Amino acid sequence: MARLIPTLLRTAILAMMLASLPGHATTQPASETELEEHVTYISERLRCLVCQNQSIAESQAELANDLRRQVREMLVAGKSDKEVLAYMVERYGDFVLYDPPFQTTTLLLWGGPAALMLIALGGFAWTVRTRRKQLQPAVLTEEERARARNLLDRADNTSTDSRA
């Protein structure tokens, strides 16, 4: 993990430099190390279709190995990052992207966690409100108080009569 962060930083800097130079985004990397960093950079943006919670850079599944090999071959052939990602999306759908685009088909994916959070907060607020109402002391009218006193007095009289 400690070696992954500097690699990611170098890859991000390389990608920014390549993107800022017009016409150089599709050139082949100058060395094998740069090619591997570029393959890793793209592989980290693609989800392993077998593992589903790992990128193809992290996964050791056979499909992930094949996809990394395919990414490498496409980069060697001079394809840009966008072309490689577009090919993967065309072949496997938006699910292959770790950061899928916001579309009507991915609305539940993007809005689902927020909707669940709102439902949970609403349920919590409703529970607190109903419990607060249940815990409030009952406010009795004068008529109800007089009736309660009368019932208590009768209960006291019957208990003192039974003791005697």
Image (cartoon, rainbow, N blue to C red):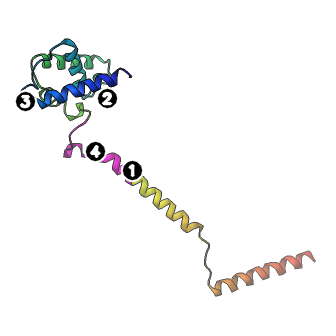
Residue 120 rendering spot, x and y as whole percentages: 42, 52
Residue 98 rendering spot, x and y as whole percentages: 26, 33
Cβ–Cβ under 8 Å for marks 3 and 1: no
The residue range painted magenta reads 99-118
CA gap between label 2 and label 3 equals 35 Å
| Among the two numbered marks 2 and 3 on one chain, the one whose residue lies closer to the N terminus | 3
Q: Nearer the viewer, mark 4 or mark 2?
A: 4
Q: Residue at x 26, y 24 (%)?
A: 10
Q: Secondary structure at mark 3?
A: loop
Residue 48 in sight from this viewpoint: no
The image quarter in which residue 62 lies: top left
| Kind of residue sitting beneath label 4 | Trp
| Among the two numbered marks 3 and 1 on one chain, the one whose residue lies closer to the N terminus | 3
Q: Secondary structure at mark 2?
A: loop
Q: Which mark is residue 22?
A: 3
Residue 50 rendering spot, x and y as whole percentages: 30, 24
| Kind of residue sitting beneath label 3 | Pro
CA gap between label 3 and label 1 equals 44 Å
The residue under label 2 is 52
Q: Secondary structure at mark 4?
A: helix
| Among the two numbered marks 2 and 1 on one chain, the one whose residue lies closer to the N terminus | 2
Q: Which mark is residue 110?
A: 4
| Among the two numbered marks 3 and 4 on one chain, the one whose residue lies closer to the N terminus | 3
Q: Which mark is residue 117?
A: 1
CA gap between label 4 and label 1 equals 13 Å
| Kind of residue sitting beneath label 2 | Gln
Q: Is residue 101 left or right of residue 143?
A: left
Residue 123 in sight from this viewpoint: yes
Q: Residue at x 22, y 27 (%)?
A: 13
